[in-house]
Amino acid sequence: MLEFARKHFEITSEPYEKHLLRLSSHDDTWLRSCAILQLGELGRTELRQPVIDALQADDPVLRETAILALKNLIPGHLYRRALRQQIANKSFPTVGRYAQAQLEAAARS
Amino acid sequence: MSRPRQNTPHRVSTNGREVGLSTIERVLFFKRADIFNQIAGRDLIDVARVAHQTEFPAGSTFIVQGDIGECLYLIVEGTASVNVRGVGEVARLSQNDVIGEMAIISREPRSADCLALTNMVTLKIDHDDFWQLLGEKPSIAQGVIRVLSSRLSDTMKQIQQRRKALGES
């Protein structure tokens, strides 16, 4: 559709990745979580910084999403280290439990 | 016909705390289910929070016809066979299908047995948790009402069409 708009109406749009990067720092934590999830699914390591930043977010859903996304973006040993850091942070117990489960899953695989 | 035995109790991960799926993954599963698809993703976070990840081994009957329904199950992984006694298998359900959704609206007797054909992972929502949520979050109630209203409208249309067909024949 964007291609059609560009071709016939000379309407241009920024690349998808740019939109995602913008949304990944949005004030709305749900929008931000969705963008972080998509960055993980894209799997492009050069786009990983917003995902790493989201590991320090105040919102537990956003933190969990960052853990999920990060799996595709950094090497296994760094991923495991990030999980251990989340487990050690007792301010976010649900995130810690999710990180623990991911660490156990990583050990099994 | 004898009642099937619920031969294997369901298992909830790690002392009842669900950890296998992230909240956003749960939200995405719920968003694909018909009964929840009119609810905004951000509101489904609360639905995801009251859901329990529940697993059933292959061969277990996890819903028994005639029992009062207390919860619904959303299938995350696996396949279930739905069997009505005296009739046989009426459906096979798999990923993203919901089993027993009317149980969270009204506690009615289950209309069929459900047998896990494979190992299953589900997200379970209890009636009481869901009703508490509906009271706290009107936007969730509105989404469910929209779906139920649409279904009622579809059913009314089907009845009218059948009446018309019967009248014409």
Image (cartoon, coloured by chain):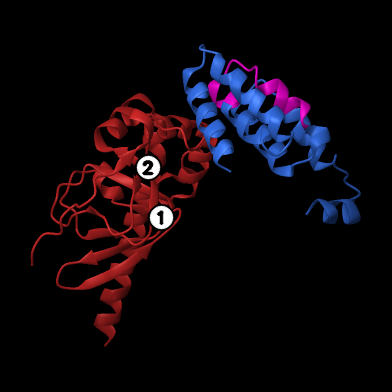
Task: Tell me the subunit letter for badge 2.
Answer: B
Q: In this rendering, does residue A25 appear at all?
A: no
Q: Is residue B169 magenta?
A: no
Secondary structure of the residue carrying numbered label 2: helix
Q: Which stretch appears magenta?
A: A48-63
Q: Position of residue B162 (x, y in %)?
A: 29, 75
Please give the residue where the numbered disc 2 appears in the rendered image: B144
- Is label 1 in contact with label 2 (beta carbons under 8 Å)? no
Classify B3 as above or below A87: below
Quadrant of residue A76 within the rendered picture: top right
Q: Is residue B69 above or below residue A71?
A: below
The colour with which the image depicts chain B is red
| Residue carrying label 1 | B97
At horizontal 60% and vertical 21% (from top left) the residue drawn is A84
- Amino acid carrying mark 1 in the image: Asp
Disc 1, SS:
loop
Q: Which mark is residue B130?
A: none
Q: Is residue B85 left or right of residue A76?
A: left
Q: Position of residue B151 (x, y in %)?
A: 35, 55
- Work out whether residue B69 can be spotted: yes
**CA gap, disc 1 to disc 2?**
16 Å
Q: Earlier in the sequence, mark 1 or mark 2?
A: 1
Question: Looking at the picture, how far across and down is residue B128, in whole percent?
Answer: 25, 32
Apparent side of residue A51 relative to residue B125 in the rendered image (left or right): right
Specify the colour of chain A.
blue
B7 or B126, which is in the foreground? B7
